[in-house]
């Protein structure tokens, strides 16, 4: 009898665990909190940034990076290829490039129009928690849980490093 009860409890725990994960992916259909206009992103949201012209939002999460139209809330792009949680995103000054800082110790550089990965930068030994372009777009600064800041040269949309 104790074994049967134990198995029932384990089965219930497993069912709750998997059900929660399934519903989390579909949370955009749930009711919005009072005052909210829309629900963006999927997974655990790590950071949200506006594009320089204010027309788009980049949403970094445990699943990837989404680009949304600010006015309509429409999903414009989803950047795939990350191997771990995305903690930080940053647009270049002209909005044509996006950098994403990842828990796998890398920075991925993306073309925002095509959604294609341009390059992956490395150099950290722990999670990349923050990325930022310099105002002229020539340098990408990244900060990591390893306590370092790495500066990577970046010119004419083609990384040098």
Image (cartoon, rainbow, N blue to C red):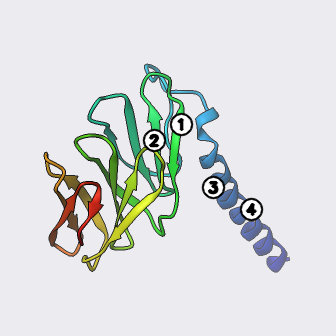
Instruction: For label 3, count other residues whose C-alpha is less than 10 Å away and answer few (under 14), some (14-19) or many (20+).
Output: few
Mark 2 = which residue? 67
Label 3 residue SS: helix
In 3D space, how far apart are the residues under numbered discs 3 and 2 (Cα atoms)? 23 Å
Distance from the alpha carbon under mark 1 to that under mark 4: 35 Å
- The tag earlier along the polypeptide, 2 or 4, is 4
Which callout, 1 or 3, points at the residue further toward the start of the chain?
3
Label 1: few (<14), some (14–19) or many (≥20) C-alpha neighbours in 10 Å? some
Where residue 41 sits: x, y (%)? Answer: 50, 43
Residue 75's disc is 1
Front disc: 2 or 4: 2
What separation in Å lies between label 1 and label 2 (alpha carbons)?
A: 6 Å
Q: Which badge, 3 or 4, comes first in the chain's sequence?
A: 4
Q: CB atoms at circles 1 and 2 under 8 Å apart?
A: yes
Nearer to me, 129 or 136: 136
Q: Secondary structure at mark 1?
A: strand
- Among numbered discs 3 and 2, the one appearing first in the sequence: 3
Q: CA distance from mark 2 to mark 4?
A: 37 Å
Tell me which label, 1 or 4, sits earlier in the chain: 4
Is residue 98 positioned above or below 84 on the image?
Answer: above
Disc number placed over residue 12 in the picture, else none: 4
Query: Nearer the observer, disc 3 or disc 2?
Result: 2
Q: Where the N terminus falls, by quadrant? A: bottom right
Q: Nearer the viewer, mark 1 or mark 4?
A: 1
Residue 130 position, x and y percent, is: 25, 58
Residue 109 horizontal/vertical position (percent): 35, 59
State the quadrant of the C terminus: bottom left
Measure how far apart labels 1 and 3 are at the Cα level.
21 Å
Residue placed at 59% from the left, 27% from the top? 31
Observer-nearest of 63 and 16: 63
> Which of labels 3 and 4 is toward the front?
3
């Amino acid at each position: 009898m104790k074994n049967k009860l134990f198995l029932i409890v384990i089965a219930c725990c497993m069912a709750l665990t998997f059900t929660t994960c399934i519903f989390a992916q579909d949370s955009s259909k749930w009711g919005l909190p009072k005052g909210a206009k829309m629900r963006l992103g999927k997974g655990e949201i790590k950071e949200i940034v506006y594009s320089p012209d204010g027309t788009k939002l980049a949403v970094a999460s445990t699943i990837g990076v989404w680009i949304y139209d600010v006015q309509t809330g429409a999903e414009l792009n989803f950047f795939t290829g990350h191997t771990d949680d995305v903690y930080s995103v940053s647009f270049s000054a002209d909005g044509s490039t996006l950098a994403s800082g990842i828990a796998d110790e890398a920075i991925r550089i993306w073309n925002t129009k095509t959604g294609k990965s341009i390059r992956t930068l490395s150099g950290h030994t722990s999670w990349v928690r923050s990325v930022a372009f310099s105002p002229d777009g020539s340098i990408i600064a990244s900060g990591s849980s390893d306590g370092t800041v790495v500066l990577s040269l970046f010119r004419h949309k083609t990384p040098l490093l």
